[in-house]
Amino acid sequence: MTDSTSRFGFSSFAETWNGRLAMLGFVIGLATELLTGQSILSQLGLG
């Protein structure tokens, strides 16, 4: 059984997962900032 829909590029499947992972990264970044008391940039040595 083959699936003829593309899962790469600008498809709705790819965009949905991109949005979900971006939201997850944002929440993890905020949680890390709250737990350490340092901004994300200062943790990376940029600020």
Image (spheres, helix red, strand yellow):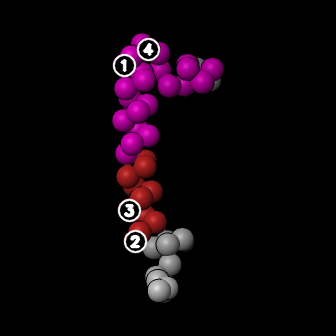
> Dots 1 and 4: beta carbons under 8 Å?
yes
3D distance between C-alphas at marks 3 and 1: 27 Å
Residue with the mark numbered 4: 36
> Dots 3 and 2: beta carbons under 8 Å?
yes
Which image quarter: residue 25?
Answer: top left
Q: Position of residue 7 (x, y in %)?
A: 49, 72
- Looking at marks 2 and 4 on the same chain, the residue that comes earlier in the sequence is marked by 2
Tell me the kind of residue under disc 1.
Leu
- Looking at marks 2 and 1 on the same chain, the residue that comes earlier in the sequence is marked by 2
Which image quarter: residue 45?
Answer: top right
The circle drawn on residue 34 is 1
Which image quarter: residue 12?
Answer: bottom left
Residue with the mark numbered 3: 16
Is residue 6 in the magenta section?
A: no
Q: Position of residue 21 (x, y in %)?
A: 43, 49
3D distance between C-alphas at marks 2 and 1: 33 Å
The circle drawn on residue 4 is none
The circle drawn on residue 12 is 2
3D distance between C-alphas at marks 3 and 2: 6 Å
Residue 38 lies left or right of residue 47; in this view the side is: left
